Image (tube, rainbow, N blue to C red):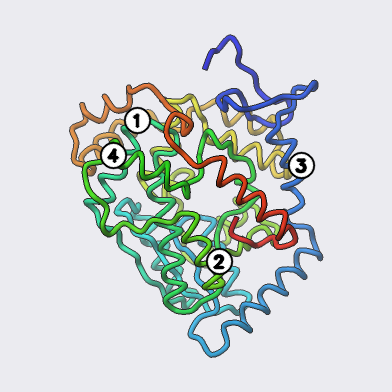
Amino acid sequence: MNSTNYQQCTRCLMDTTDPDIRFNGQGECNHCTEFIQTRALYNYQGAKSDAELAAWVGRMKKDGQGKEYDCVVGLSGGIDSSYAAHLCRKMGLRVLGVHMDNGWNSEEAVMNIKNIAKKLNVDYESYVLDWEEFKDLQLAFLKASVPEADTPTDIAILAALHKVASKYKIKYIISGGNFATEGILPKTWHYNAKDLTYFNHIQKKFGTVKLRKFPTFGFQKEMYYKFIRRIKMVYILNYVPFVKDEAMELLRQELDWKYYGGKHYESKYTGFIQSYYLFEKFGIDYRRATFSSQICTGEITREEALKQLESKPYNDEKVQEEKIYIAKKLGISIEEFEEIMKLPGHYYRHYPNDEKKLSFIYDAYRKIFKKEKLGSF
């Protein structure tokens, strides 16, 4: 990014670290404008949201009759998924927790999952990935030098949740995703994990292992699970007044939940990618997107967010230790890891992808099913 052309939104905190960002005459960006005009309509709206959520809970209980569970909840040990599990049990849903284990769990996350299962009386299954294949995939995405270096994890989570739901004939998957903290996220920062043309090209070009066990999840599988198996993704946190700090305090008090030290650090690898890797290689501070969403919802002020951005998104004292740990776990030397970090950055558009086709399909779906807020697209 050319620093002489740098610009930051006057309303939120998004900036030209997103090369596709656009500004209007008042200096307000397309991200917060879209959020306020469109996406904010899907946030919590009092009695209306309460009634909609109650109706969906009723449907889940009805469809769960004669089965062991009403819904699947993905458990990472993080704030969002833990709070989603708490809400489901509070509403009387019979929950099957599913944890996709990719080998990077923090100790706090492991303990949080165990406490959730025990204190909420939730059965849970762990979907364990083949480490050799997964390690090779992660290295391939690092060598591709793209922002979405954690795409293999994103795909595996979706695949694991849908496989388990299908196995038990469960029609609903509860996601901790939400607009309140994740409504703004540029495509250049995190491209569509379900683009298998992009995914397969990177693995073929930079990987060394043939994938035999890794669970992929592309457009065709999504169609199968959605229209044949009739499985829906339910973004339950969009239907409640979700405030992260308040949710964290409730989890601490009721479930002995423990914080893991940073956004997405329930996974040591994901936390490192979103804090150090993105910031140092691309100048991307992931907190900008979260804070911008929260500014738009009124959870924090722009001034408060700017103050927090004065510090780096990672801990200088711990980052070298993290790099050594990650390099060793990936089976490369710290020198090799540093060389990968120095590779020039690329974006998804530098590699073969199905962006146009997938955008057309998903846009068409949204128009057809525009009233269905809980869909998986």
- C-alpha separation, residue under disc 2 versus residue under disc 1: 46 Å
Closer to the observer: label 1 or label 4?
Answer: 4
Disc 1 residue crowd, few under 14, some 14–19, many 20+, Cα 10 Å: few
The image quarter in which residue 352 lies? top left
Which residue is labeled 2 in the image? 226
Q: Is residue 59 left or right of residue 81?
A: right
Query: Badge 4 is on which residue?
Result: 139
**Residue that carries the numbered disc 3 in the rendered image:** 36
Marks 3/4: CA distance? 38 Å
The answer to which quarter of the image holds residue 172 is bottom right
Asked if disc 3 and disc 1 are in contact, CB closer than 8 Å, the reply is no
- Identify the amino acid type marked 4: Leu
Disc nearer the start of the sequence (2/3): 3
Front disc: 3 or 1: 3
What residue appears at the point 60 percent right and 64 percent down from the top-left corner? 234
Q: Is residue 32 above or below residue 94?
A: above
- Residue 318, compared with residue 136, is above or below; it is above
Q: Residue at x 55, y 66 (%)?
A: 226
Q: Which residue is mark 1?
A: 317
- Between 127 and 285, the one lying in front of the other is 127
| Image location of residue 108, percent across then percent down | 38, 55
Residue at figure coordinates x 69%, y 32% from the top left: 12
Q: CA distance from mark 2 to mark 4?
A: 31 Å
What residue lies at 24% left-to-right and 35% top-to-bottom? 324
- Amino acid identity at mark 1: Glu
